[in-house]
Image (cartoon, rainbow, N blue to C red):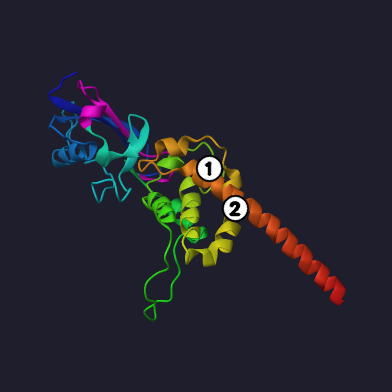
Amino acid sequence: MSKENVVLRVKRQDGPQSPARWEEFSVPRHAGANVLSVLMQVRENPVTASGQKTTPPAWDAACLEEVCGSCSMLVNGRARQACTALIETYSPNGEPITLEPFSKFPLVRDLVVDRSRMFESLKKVRAWIPIDGTYDLGPGPRMSQKTAEERYVMSTCMTCGCCLEVCPQVNTHSPFIGAAAISQARLFNAHPTGQLNESERLHALMEPGGVADCGKAGNCVQACPKEIPLTTSIAEMNREVTWKAVKDFFVRDSDDHEKKDAS
């Protein structure tokens, strides 16, 4: 092991149907470097550690400051953001750093995966505040400082996929939407205007793949790079869904009785 160079072991795959392979790269070490900056060095001169010319590894990145969530990958087997994975942390004495794509999402190429299932889940729980954009609505509704602080933490979710990657309930045999979408449903149900669509979000969480499918492993809250209290959100939404189911039952039962009386 050399402290002069950074050694990356990258899992390569040209496409979903192509065979996987490992390639090792060695580039000069720089103070303060992160995984993405080392990948950029490799891209400038894509030659393996054995001297073989190859194609540059493909990966996703945008903000480079752990805000967009696009550079999610497995760094030494841990789900995290590559932009904040410092080389000094993962290779203090020249140890090789292993990079792999997330395994719970369809592979596109190399370290790039398709996280569409997360965005479809956000659509399912209506993770937005519907407004009428045809005229000025004026200032938004006020909320307490406590609610604002709770909502801020949840609003930092960047749909990176780390919580789904470590969740044992997320697999090819389960429709579970994952902790991120459940927490976003809680975020928008806590908004004074978002409460207008609270019932729709709760009904979405009652469907197969909803909050009841959570296995309570708790891996999500450990993996979240923003330290969002995901297990708290799951517990809160589980309680809200239960209350909603009880209310719906009695409302439906009351409606049935009224129909019988009318007939």
**The C terminus lies in quadrant:** bottom right
Which residue corresponds to the image point at 55% horizontal and 44% vertical from the top-left?
235
Tell me: residue 62, above or below residue 95. below
Residue type highlighted by circle 1 = Thr
Residue 81 is left or right of residue 182, and the answer is left
Which residue corresponds to the image point at 39% horizontal and 69% vertical from the top-left?
140
The residue to which callout 2 is attached is: 240
Q: Position of residue 33 (x, y in %)?
A: 17, 35
Magenta span: 87-108
Which residue corresponds to the image point at 27% horizontal and 44% vertical from the top-left?
58
Q: Nearer the viewer, residue 157 or 53?
A: 157
The residue to which callout 1 is attached is: 172
Residue 225 is left or right of residue 55, and the answer is right
Q: Position of residue 69 (x, y in %)?
A: 33, 48
Tell me: residue 50, above or below residue 55. above
CB within 8 Å, label 2 to label 1: no
